[in-house]
Amino acid sequence: MFGFDPLVLGIVLLVAVSAGAVCYGLLFSRMETEKKAASRVSRVASAELDKQNVKAARDRVQEMSKRRKSMQDNLKDLEKRQQENAKKKLTLKSRLTQAGLTITPGRFYMFSGIFGFVLMFAAFLFGAPTMVVLGLPIVAGLGLPRWILGFLIKRRQNKFLEEFPNALDVIVRSIKSGLPLNDAIRLIANEGKEPVKGEFRRVVESQQVGLSVPDACTRMVNHMPLQEVNFFSIVIAIQSQAGGNLSEAIGNLSKVLRERKKMKAKVKALSMEAKASAVIIGALPFIVATLVYLTSPQYMMVLFTDPRGHLIMGVSAVWMSIGIFVMRNMVNFDI
């Protein structure tokens, strides 16, 4: 067994520690320099990354602002065009198209004239006064057919509003299943119900002659001037300019239209009492005059035979018309 001298072992250990201390002292400055350099490089890289992130974020914000401005400009242009179209006086041909009639304006005037002359001839046979015989064709030939035309337009628009949300739901399901918007619109044009089917068929025909989908949907407002159709054309225009989830946008529009329909029904139910009161108040003078005529004919005949009675009836008709007009505006609500 070899023995180790503690003194020698202590000297060796001391030499090793001294050598390590000398090496550490010589390499410490270099290690610190490398550490500071690495830290500096890391900070520079982090700063460069932050600058790139800030620049990318700034570019995204600028791009979004440009797209938003472009979309706003397009919407303003669309609203301007729609306001110009609304200010234009509708021609008889446009009104016939909105009513879903296929007759020409010439035939409409012809039927109106025939109807007026038939009523004039009937009034002449029954011995009506000359003023009535001459005035009846004007009222019946010009006023009554146009009133019937307006009634047909309103009825067709109501049918369109009943079916339009269902058509939008079909478009949403078609887009979610993978069909493009053109095929979804073509599906409504082939399988939908009138009058929605006819209006979407016009959109398809407009596409076939070269119009884009947003322009074709915008033209739909000319044939069906409703706010709901205007909303649909705006949604399509926004999606074509800004992109996004079209099925979600049209689905939200369908929900909004259904809520509008519910609100209209609720307002109509709440206003029925006021409308009934207005009808009773408006009809009361005529009912009283009829009852007085049945009980005392001579008392009422003075209004028809005396010139002063004619004046009284004329003034009364004017005031009744003003009252009916005011009551009508009071009980009608636009939503």
Image (cartoon, rainbow, N blue to C red):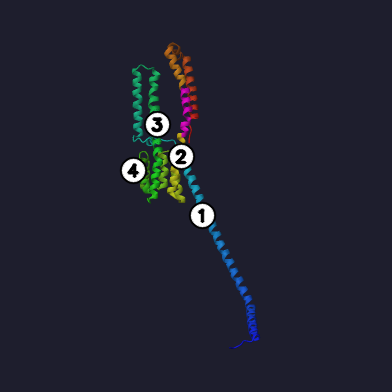
- Which of label 4 and label 1 is nearer to you? 4
Residue 186 appears at what percent x and percent y?
Answer: 35, 46
Q: Is residue 335 above or below residue 316?
A: below
Instruction: Answer with the quarter of the image where residue 128 lies.
Output: top left
Counting residues from the start of the chain, the first of labels 3 and 2 encountered is 3
Q: Is residue 155 shown above or below 32? A: above
Give the residue type at disc 1: Glu
Which one is nearer the viewer's eye here, 324 or 92? 324
Q: Amino acid at mark 4?
A: Glu
The residues colored magenta run 266-282
Numbered circle sitting on residue 210? none
Q: Secondary structure at mark 3?
A: helix
**Distance from the alpha carbon under mark 2 to that under mark 4:** 25 Å
Q: Of the two numbered discs 2 and 4 on the same chain, state the one appearing first in sequence.
A: 4
Residue topped by disc 1: 63
Q: Secondary structure at mark 2?
A: helix
In the figure, residue 1 lies in which quadrant?
Answer: bottom right
What SS does tag 4 mark? helix
Q: Position of residue 235 (x, y in %)?
A: 45, 46
Residue marked by disc 2? 259
**Residue 96 at x, y = what percent?**
37, 35
Can the viewer see residue 112 in this picture? yes
> Residue placed at 56% from the left, 61% from the top?
50
Residue denoted by label 3: 151
- Alpha carbons under labels 4 and 1: distance apart: 41 Å
Bin the neighbour count of mark 2 within 10 Å (Cα to Cα): few under 14, some 14-19, many 20 and up.
Answer: few
Amino acid at circle 3: Phe
Q: Are marks 1 and 3 in contact (CB under 8 Å)?
A: no
Residue pictured at 46% horizontal, 39% vertical: 259
Mark toward the viewer: 3 or 2 = 2
